[in-house]
Image (spheres, rainbow, N blue to C red):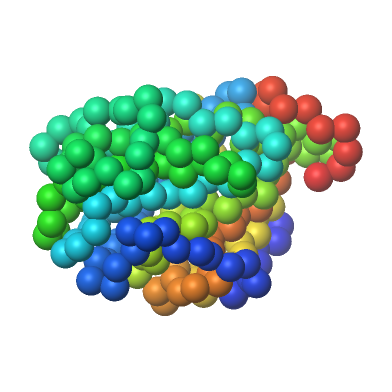
């Protein structure tokens, strides 16, 4: 099977008003659990060091079929309150220990308050529906897991695994990676992608995966070849 390594796709990031150079995300860990119906439970753990600003945001661009539910944020002090409406112009205090979703022309932004300056660990979780499609020849997806953010992480590690432990192997899957300097490989029944240099403007982490029929039963049906 094919494993390919790519660098720097030409896709541009834009920055929100909350972006400030004094803030850093040295480490970002992402776990993607592929569910039976083709949705994915995604967990991101951010190790952050902040000095300024009011919020973080994570852009999720819609391909016309994706849908997000079950969005939550927590840190070492507990789970944040999910607001029905998120106001990007609210104060630091108003955003503290709260999260929300902002709809944009390209999809949504998942937002949460910095809440406390200094070093902090944020755990973000959500369900991404219709990620895996059922094509004529195979099942799969092409998705940008790290896209527009408040600012760029230094080290990114992403693991994709099946919900029931079915191994994702070289014999059953093909994998490709785009948009960053790093690696992707099969590892212990899962797929592991990681950066080898800090992400910069114009970079992202996009993973394309095709898998044999029968590993999942995706709800999203596509009448064409992958």
Return the x and y of residue 95 as percentages of the image width and height.
Answer: 23, 41
- The residue positioned 61% from the left and 62% from the top of the image is 177
Residue at screen point 48% across, 30% down? 127
Q: Is residue 98 above or below residue 159?
A: above
Front residue (pair 14, 60): 14
- Left or right: 148, with 10 as reference point: left
Q: Position of residue 102 (x, y in %)?
A: 45, 39
Would residue 165 be visible to someone looking at this image? no
Residue name at image x 52 percent, y 38 percent:
103
Q: Nearer the viewer, residue 159 or 68?
A: 68
Determine the image quadrant of residue 43: top left
Q: Is residue 133 left or right of residue 34?
A: right
Work out whether residue 112 or residue 178 is closer to the camera in this orientation and state it.
Answer: 112
Q: Is residue 71 visible?
A: yes
Q: Is residue 5 left or right of residue 26?
A: right
Residue at x-position 32% and y-position 47% = 89
The N terminus lies in quadrant: bottom right
Is residue 116 depicted above or below 3 in this figure?
Answer: above
Asked if residue 57 is positioned above or below residue 66 in the image, the reply reads below
Q: Position of residue 173 (x, y in %)?
A: 67, 47
Nearer the observer, 41 or 79: 79
> Residue 158's x, y, as percent?
44, 53
Which of the 4 quarters of the picture holds residue 199? Answer: bottom left
Left or right relative to 149: residue 114: left
User: Which quarter of the rendered picture does the C terminus lie within?
Assistant: top right
């Amino acid at each position: 099977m094919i494993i390919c390594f790519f660098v720097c796709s030409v896709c541009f990031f834009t920055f929100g008003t909350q972006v400030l150079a004094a803030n850093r995300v040295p480490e970002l860990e992402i776990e993607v659990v592929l569910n039976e119906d083709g949705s994915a439970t995604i967990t991101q753990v951010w190790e952050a060091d902040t000095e300024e600003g009011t919020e973080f945001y994570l852009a999720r661009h819609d391909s016309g079929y994706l849908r997000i539910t079950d969005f939550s944020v927590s840190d070492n002090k507990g789970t944040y309150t999910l607001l029905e409406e998120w106001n990007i112009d609210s104060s630091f205090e108003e955003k503290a220990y709260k999260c929300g979703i902002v709809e944009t022309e390209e999809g949504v932004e998942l937002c949460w308050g910095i809440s406390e300056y200094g070093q902090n660990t944020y755990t973000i979780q959500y369900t991404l529906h219709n990620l895996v499609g059922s094509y004529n020849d195979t099942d799969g997806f092409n998705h940008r897991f790290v896209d527009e953010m408040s600012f760029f992480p230094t080290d990114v590690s992403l693991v994709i695994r099946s919900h029931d432990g079915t191994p994702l192997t070289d014999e059953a899957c093909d994998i490709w990676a785009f948009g960053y300097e790093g690696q992707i490989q099969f590892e212990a029944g899962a797929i592991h992608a990681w950066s080898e240099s800090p992400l910069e403007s114009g970079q992202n982490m996009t993973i394309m995966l095709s898998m044999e029929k029968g590993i999942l039963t995706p709800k999203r049906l596509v009448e064409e070849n992958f």
